[in-house]
Amino acid sequence: MDGPAGPSPCQLRKGRDETMERLSANDSGSCQNDSCQCDRTQNEVKINSKRFGRGAIESGLTHECGVFGAIGTGEWPTQVDVAQVICLGLVALQHRGQESAGIVTSEGKSARTFNTHKGMGLINNIFNDEAMRKLKGNLGIGHTRYSTSAASEEVNCQPFVVHTAHGALAVAHNGELVNCSSLRKMVLGRGVGLSTHSDSELITQALCLNPPEGETNGPDWPARINHLMRLAPLSYSLVIMLKDKIYAVRDPYGNRPLCLGKILPLGSSFLMNGSAKNGVEDRAEGWVVSSESCGFLSIGARYVREVLPGEIIEMSRHGVRTVDVVERPADKHQAFCIFEYVYFARADSIFEGQMVYSARLQCGRMLARESPVDADIVSSVPESGTAAAHGYARQSGIPFMEVLCKNRYVGRTFIQPSTRLRQLGVAKKFGALSENVRGKRIVLIDDSIVRGNTIGPIIKLLRDAGAAEVHIRIASPPLKYPCYMGINIPTREELIANKMDSFKLAEHVGADSLEYLSVEGLVSAIHYNMKVTPSDGVGGHCTACLTGEYPGGLPDDVDW
């Protein structure tokens, strides 16, 4: 089936009504105006029945998740409560997924049995005292998950556990395999059965296959992981647990985040830059690996560093070591997901040597330079737009003031499966601080606009509270392309930026003006405080959802 490629720039300029008429009449999404000079070279990809309408129906492969692993060092049984550490680590990653979660632990004695507990819902509801008592162990991994509505089933809860001829194996995965179809055919062709459509299970089963060079003295797990990484170059961060080891793995493009932390004795210095106090290295009581560093302080761990793109780290009772690094093609750059900075990551997490908060602050400064406006106050859609709003206020000299009061017991509308739930979520999510709003010209900052369902009701709320003007500024570029690497940005026709330009969108949502940060502005803001230099392929970012330039290109067997 040929999937809609979205309207061309020519169509966007014709106005909302005409554009929507063209969209319904023109299935290909290509420009029908022969005199137009718009770009007709945008990628058009085949979409089979499994992926068509993803985000609304049966995809089952799109998810934004969090992974976590912990292991005690020294003599076992360890003094570290591994299950509690993992549970607290998952709580810190709860923003990455709120549909299901699981923890698997090992006591390091038997290769045959793991302790497992998984379920649907939030972390604190799944892991009660009884469940935690069963999760005894000296090492373990955990996972918190968000997926499309069709995949919200307990059978898809991670970590996945399989029993091999060499013992039990557990895998937790964040990301999505871009060549899932060909890998699935290969695994099925080897006689391996699959019980779900999840590529996380596919990874687990693929690891059970012998590497092509063979094995002599039992399983060579680093070689098996290396083989998997060559078969599937992106996108994933993995934690893989055996009887007495954990492997932390990041794809060769570094698309999904993964970082390493050290559990320190009480009373140690918990500096977040990976350095030791007075140059003396503290003894490690254990090691942790996580999608984000935001939970390290709460579990008594110090951030050490990121897992490098393509790196395979082995974690054991003896410490951590790099056992292999799988290189990406020489002509390809690192492609860390730039949307982690924009939206997904918690503000206190560290990527590429900088805190996410400082990157968002710089995005706001850049936005103020690119799209100034006369106003009385700058404010934000809490809390996702707050850091950028402070940056905008500092750069513009317009004071920051809160105008929206958030109900903190309502989940983020981005990660609710249906449009109806997203729209209902807005009505119960915010209240207006009318004393701050009445008679004011407001610059309202948000981090992104996806489908455009939520910003209109917010503007109406502010106008009903007496706002004189509402100018919307978005601290990221327009989202125009789906993500096929683990984030729920579904199809091009669902993205509002493909239906309306900023002028028409402002009219549609009831704003006095609406402007986005440019792609160049976003990249510049992210690079501003980076501690690594974006050269020689290091520190590069994936902007596929903004530009349509996918880091690995389009594979030959693309099933998108």
Image (cartoon, rainbow, N blue to C red):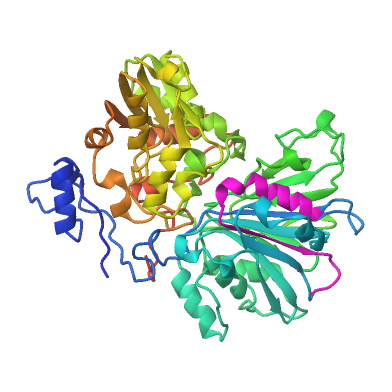
Residue lying at the far left of the rendered structure: 35
Relative to 137, 416 lies left or right = left
- Depicted 190 relative to depicted 22: above or below: below
Position of the C terminus, as image quadrant, is bottom left
> x, y (%) of residue 377?
41, 16
- Depicted 495 relative to depicted 100: above or below: above
Is residue 120 visible in the rendered structure shown here? yes
- Depicted 7 relative to depicted 429: above or below: below
> x, y (%) of residue 429?
47, 38
Position of the N terminus, as image quadrant, is bottom left
Q: Does the magenta run of residues contain 99?
A: yes
Total numbered circles: 0
Residue at 43% across, 58% down? 484
> x, y (%) of residue 222?
69, 67
Residue at 71% across, 59% down? 141
Camera-nearest residue between 365 and 61:
61
Residue lying at the far bottom of the rendered structure: 191
Camera-nearest residue between 130 and 43:
130
Q: What stretch is highlighted in magenta?
A: 82-111
Q: Does the magenta run of residues contain 143?
A: no
Residue at 90% across, 59% down? 76
Residue at 61% across, 78% down? 212
Quarter occupied by residue 195: bottom right
Quarter occupied by residue 245: bottom right
